[in-house]
Amino acid sequence: MAKELLMGNQAIAAGAIRAGVGVVAGYPGTPSTETLETVAARNPGDIYVEWSTNEKAALEVAAGAALSGVRSLVTMKQVGLNVASDPLMSLAYIGVKGGMVVLAADDPGPISSQTEQDTRQFAEFANLPVFDPSSPEEAYRMIQDAFEYSEKYGTPVLFRPTTRVCHGCASIDLDGQRKKPAAGNFEKDPKWVIFPKLSFQSHLKINARQPVLAEDFSGYWGNVLTPGSGKKGIAAGGVSWAYLKEAISLLGADCRLLKIGTSNPFPERLALEFLDGLDEVLVVEELSPVIERALVHLAGRKHLPVEIFGRQTGHITGAGENTVESVKKAVAEFLEISFEETAAAEPPALPVRPPVLCAGCPHRASFYAVKQAAKGVKSVFCGDIGCYTLGNAMPLDMVDTCLCMGAGITMAQGIRRAAPDTKTFAFVGDSTFFASGITGVVNAVYNETDMTLIVLDNSTTAMTGHQPHPGTGKTMMGEVTEKISIPKVLEAVGVKKVLTVNPLQLDQAIAAVREAMAEKGVSAVIFQSPCIAVVKPDRPVRVDTDKCVGCRKCIREIGCPALELDGKKVRVEPSACTGCGLCTQICPVSAIEKEE
C-alpha cells in the first residue's frame, strides 16, 4: 500500500485522478489553487487541465465535459463560486451525465479572502449535494465518492474543504486501481437545452430527489454517530470535527457525538437516532449554523424536547475559525467539566509587520507615477483584487475602493457619474483584466464615460502563485500559445488612447499618465514590468552617505521595505533590494546610486 505525505489539496487531486477525472478546469484562488496544480503535475497524460479565464468559464468547460459523459472537476475559492453561480444554478436543473464535482474552498478567518461565506448554504440554495471533509485523509476518499454520487443522481456535486483541510498535511494511503477517464461522447437530447417548462419539471424532480439522497446520506460513512453516556450530545462537521475529537480526548469526556460530512440534503434518519433521548445538544461548526439550523428544524418538526446550542445561541463564536482551544472551552462549559487552563508561556513581542508590496515590485512604481501625475486633481483611485490591493497602504495610499474582481473598472464609472468633477482611475492586474475586467471596459466605452484605466501588467498571476493566464503565452498543459495582447483588446473595444510604458522609468510613466488623463472618454495606460518573483533581480542599489541629507523622501513617498534608517541617514538592505532603481529616481540629491 503506497503511502505519501500530502497536503489536503494534493490529496483531493490524487483522489480525483484515481476516480477517473478527465477534464479539470479552474481559476486560481487561495485556498484552492494547489488542487489543479497537483492534477497537472501528476497528470498520467490522459487528463485535460486548464486555468480558465475565470470561474464561470471554468464551470462551463467542466459542464460541457460532464454532459459528454466525462468526469470533470472545477476548482475555485468560495468567492469564485459567486462568479460561477449563474451556470451552476441552471446546471442543477439540467443535470449531468459524467460525474461533475465543483470544489469551492471556504476560508474561515478569513485568512486570504474578502468574505467568510459558507458554501454549504449555497448548496441548500441550489439544492445540490455537498461534501464537507474534516481532514486530508477524508478529502481523498470523499472526492472519489463525490464523483460516484454525481453520476448516481445525475447532478453536479459541491465539495467544500476549508483552509485548514486544504493546507493541512497527512499521510495518505494511495491504494487501489486508478479508473481511466471515459471517452467523451455527446449524445443529443432536448433535456440539455434549458427552457421554462423543462426547468419546472426538473425542479419537481429535484424536490423529489432530496429525501432519497438524505436517506442515502444517512448510511454514508462520512456521517458518523458515536454512542456515549448521558443526556447531552455534540454534533460537528468539517475540520471542527477534528477539533472536537481532540477536545473530547483532552477532557476525558464521554457523550454521544454526531459527525456530519454531507450537510445537504441533511441525513435526517441518522440525526434522529442521535437526538433520540437527548436533552441538550451543542453544535460545533464553521462558519454558518448550517448543522445547528437543520437540527433545530428537525427537532421542531418531530416535537423533540431537546435544546440545541451553537453559533446562533452564542455558545460557539459567530465569526472566524474554531480552534482546539476554543472548542475545548465550549465543550467543557457545555458538559460542565472543570479543567485547568494552562497558560502558554508568553512569547516575545514581535514587531508589527503590516502587509506590504515586495521590494522592487513594479506596482509600487505604477502607483507612485499615477500619484505624481494626479497631484492637484480631485481624483478617486479604484482598486481591485490582487497583490496591488496593497497599494492602499501608506505611504502610497492609492486604493480608495476594492470590492471584487473587475469591480474597480465599473465602480470608477459610477463614481464619475455621481461626481462629474472627480477624475477616476481604475487599477486592474493583467490576469484580472482577462478574468473580469474586459466587460467593464466595454461598458465604459459604450456609455462614453470619462475615466483612465491603469493595467498593471506583471506577466503573471502573482497573488496566487504565478499561474499562467491568456496574456502569458503558456497554458497549464505546458503548451506555448499565442499571447493575447491587452493593448489590442483595448483598441478593439474602442479605447482610443492606449499607452504602454515601463513604470520603473518614472519620468516616462508620469508623462504617459498625464497624457491619458487629458483624453476625453476612456483612456488606458498599461504599465508593463514583470513581477520580481519571475525575473532575476538586478544588483542592489547603494546610498552614498556623503550625499545623503537625511530628508527621508525615499522612505516617506514609496515605502519600499529595502529602505531603512541608519541613524539620520538612509541605508539600503542589500538582501532585500532587487535593484529596480525607483528610489534612485526619487532622491532629490542623487544620493542613491545603481552599482555598475
Image: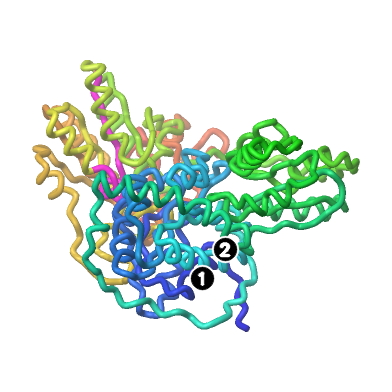
Dot 1 amino acid type: Gly
Q: CA distance from mark 1 to mark 2?
A: 8 Å
- Residue 139: mark in rendering: 2
Determine whether 5 is above or below 44 in the image.
above
Residue 411 as seen in the image, left or right of residue 277: left
Q: Which residue bears the numbered disc 1?
A: 15
Q: Amino acid at mark 2?
A: Ala
Query: Dividing the picture into quarters, in which one does residue 544 lie?
Result: top left
Left or right: where 457 falls relative to 28: left
Work out which quarter of the rendered image holds the N terminus and state it. bottom right
> Residue at point 29% right, 51% down?
529
Q: Is residue 358 visible?
A: no
Q: Is residue 409 a member of the stretch shown in magenta?
A: no
Asked if residue 417 lies left or right of residue 338, the reply is: left
Does the magenta-highlighted stretch encompass residue 429? yes
State which tag comes first along the sequence, 1 or 2.
Answer: 1
Q: Residue at x 38, y 41 (%)?
A: 385
**Mark 1 vs 2: CB contact within 8 A:** yes
Q: Range of the magenta residues?
A: 422-437
Q: Position of residue 58 (x, y in %)?
A: 33, 57
Picture coordinates of residue 465, whole percent (x, y)? 43, 57
Q: Residue at x 25, y 50 (%)?
A: 194
Q: Residues within 10 Å of mark 1 (few under 14, many from 20)?
A: many
409 to 48, vertically: above or below: above
Q: Identify whether 540 is placed above or below 570.
A: below
In terms of secondary structure, where does tag 1 sit?
A: helix
Would you identify the image quadrant in which residue 24 lies?
Answer: bottom left
Q: Nearer the viewer, residue 39 or 366?
A: 39
> In the picture, which quadrant includes the C terminus?
bottom left
Q: Where residue 584 sits: x, y (%)?
A: 35, 42
Taking depth in this image into account, of 211 and 550 the one nearest to the observer is: 211
